[in-house]
Amino acid sequence: MSSNDLEITALINRQWLTEWNNVQFDEVNRRKPQPHFYLFSIKASTLKRLSKVYPRKADKLRKDDTGIQRRHDPDRSADIKKYVHGGFPWSELSRSQKANQENDHLKMPGWLPTAIIANILSPKSKRGENTLLENESVTVVEEKNGLSKIRLPKEVLAESWDPIVAPIEIIDGQHRLWAFDKDESLDGDFEFPVIAFYDLDIAWQAYLFYTINIKPKKINASLAFDLYPILRVQEWLEASSEGNQVYKETRAQELTEVLWSNSKSPWYGKINMLGESNSGLVTQAALIRTLVATFIKGNSNKNLGGLYGAVIKSVDDNWVLPWNRPQQAAFLIFIWNSITKALKQSSVDWAEKIRSLSGIQFEEGVDSAFMSRFALLSTDQGVRGVFHIYNDLCYLNASNLGLFDIRWDDELKEDFIDNKDVDKALRQFDSLKIRTFIDKISNEIIKFNWSTSATPTLDEATRKNQMLFKGSGGYKELRHQLLILLEASDDIEIKNLATNVLNILGY
């Protein structure tokens, strides 16, 4: 690569209204951006190298990633590659049809004139715990007449080029880049038009991604919060009827459906998905409300947010847990599997009394202490209490549990949560130290009396206590009593976390 190839002339495009100066900026992750961006063209393979759009290393931890999860659909990029080489409709022909010379007239140019949206990092920019090196940076030199020079790193095309932090981040258009091999040699020229911002905070990149892809309703709004997890905690989306609430409710519905449809879930086929009366099952609507109030809730003024939907305050840089949909669904199944396993292996008095009652078995193979008309665990209030406990303790302990190091490398389905991905995530959790922590909580909470007030074996005092869990006020009361139980635990970690939650809540 010659010195001339390392320097690209760019057009400066000014876009900044005076009224935008009144936008609320901050120095954490939404600094005031430059009043212009750059337009230039660059070889597809070179841009791919600069943006490091190729598979992540298997030994790279989540905390070392940029914080922006981008799902890659290989089929989509493969289709783009076919289109580039043969245009439309040639790219959609079968191999035998392409071999037929009578179809040669269907071959066309495969133009991709839409601009890639990118961000040029400033030297020494940090991503996770890593820093962009000066000699691996792209520099921008302003010139007169509305032009500037984009200078590329000298080693960008060297075989050894492998920056820990890539100097360019792709905001929109990565599938077009994936259509090209990073070392691909093309017969002719194929350059991408690029619109590049300089030193743009990740929060602004997420904002651009959202306005480009979600506002026009191009992709699943819930999936967008996997691609840019920081979108889950943006105030401007909280205030939008089409933004954060869409994520919360859509995600809650998706997770509920997995709890119901995954064969490894204790809730498999046992959620009232249609809201039928007298079914004896917790309803889909109740589970959605519970998830929005627990795991998916945003930041609260008590600094006790949702594990999936809030900034984790216990993490040094106050980041968002970047788990995707399969991981989130699997963790809920993982929790309930731990509870039902602990329950089946125990002989606590309340559970034995429920099991001894006749005619209450929900169905063959189901523990009636977990699911029957006398089991509080499987009621709306019981599920809400369980989710509050596991969410709150995991939220406060996320850093110590290494939750940010649980990573995901595979592509995701855009239109649904694949149960194969959920099963993979379950295997991940099963082999990590989070299992010990979850099991410790489960072994404690099954000591609680999970009998409903209608259980005939209850004495009058216990029946009156269980009556406290009915109605909307029952949510708070059950949560409070569960925390008191955990605060009395012999396990110091569980005890201290429960005390911390009680203090935060002011109970």
Image (spheres, helix red, strand yellow):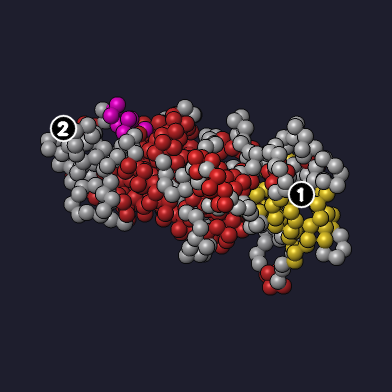
Residue beneath the point at 70% across and 55% down: 193
Badge nearest the viewer, 2 or 1 = 1
35 left or right, relative to 374: right
Q: Residue furthest left?
A: 358
Residue 298: x and y in percent read: 49, 54
Q: Nearer the viewer, residue 359 or 73?
A: 73
Q: Which residue is mark 2?
A: 356
Residue 246: name its quadrant: bottom left
Q: Residue furthest front?
A: 102
As drawn, the label of residue 122 is 1
The answer to whether residue 458 is seen in the rendering is: no
Residue 79: x and y in percent read: 54, 46
As drawn, the label of residue 180 is none
Numbered range of the magenta stretch:
338-346
User: Are the residues at dot 2 and dot 1 in contact (C-beta closer than 8 Å)?
Assistant: no
The stretch drawn in magenta includes residue 339: yes
Residue beneath the point at 19% across and 39% down: 362
- SS state under label 1: loop
Neighbourhood count class around disc 2 (C-alpha, 10 Å): few under 14, some 14–19, many 20 upward: few
Residue 399: x and y in percent read: 56, 38
The answer to whether residue 161 is seen in the rendering is: yes
Amino acid beneath label 1: Ser
- SS state under label 2: helix
263 left or right, relative to 502: left
Classify 8 as above or below 484: below
